[in-house]
Image (cartoon, rainbow, N blue to C red):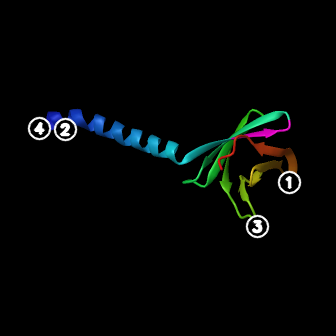
Amino acid sequence: MKKILLLALPVLLSGCSYYHQMMDRMHTDTLEYQCGDKPLSVKLDNSRQQVSFVYDNKPLTLEQGLSASGARYTDGIYVFWSKGDSATVYKHDRVVLDNCQLQNPKR
């Protein structure tokens, strides 16, 4: 009995890991923006209330913050602010990506 349990334990643990990865993928949307001539791919994780994207060859993960309108995410340095089908990225309150338009928005 102990041998079966020892053999089954790694399988059960890997199943738990797979389940969590699957749930993370289910709660994550990838949003494709076009900011002038620059594309911006943003992963929106609703369960963790955060977005992640790469800007200036640097991976960023921003937490959802307070917003009077739209959705605002920040790490204290960068801000990703979206409203409707458009978004803006700020660094230290300076606009670094403006006029970002969501490509193929879901309606």
Counting from the top left corner in percent of width and height, residue 60 is at 69, 42
Type of residue at label 2? Leu
- Relative to 86, 11 lies left or right: left
Q: Secondary structure at mark 3?
A: loop
The answer to whether the residues at label 2 and label 4 have Cβ atoms under 8 Å apart is yes
Counting from the top left corner in percent of width and height, residue 15 is at 34, 39
User: In which image quadrant can residue 47 be found?
Assistant: bottom right
Q: Which residue is mark 4?
A: 1
The residue mark sitting in front, 1 or 3, is 3
- Relative to 60, 49 lies left or right: left
- Relative to 45, 70 lies left or right: right
Decide which of 85, 1 is in the foreground and name it. Answer: 85
Which residues fall within the magenta stretch? 32-36
- Relative to 12, 18 lies left or right: right
User: In which image quadrant can residue 36 be found?
Assistant: top right
Upstream in the sequence, badge 1 or badge 4? 4
Q: CA distance from mark 4 to mark 3?
A: 60 Å
Type of residue at label 3? Ala
- Marker disc for residue 68: 3
Question: Is 57 located above or below residue 74 in the figure?
Answer: above
Disc tally is 4
Question: Is 35 located above or below residue 49 in the figure?
Answer: above
Verify whether residue 58 appears in magenta: no
Residue lying farthest front?
Answer: 107
Q: Which residue is mark 2?
A: 5
Let me know if residue 75 appears in the view.
Answer: yes
Upstream in the sequence, badge 2 or badge 3? 2
Q: Which residue is mark 1?
A: 93
Residue at screen point 50% across, 45% down: 26
Upstream in the sequence, badge 1 or badge 3? 3
Q: Secondary structure at mark 4?
A: loop
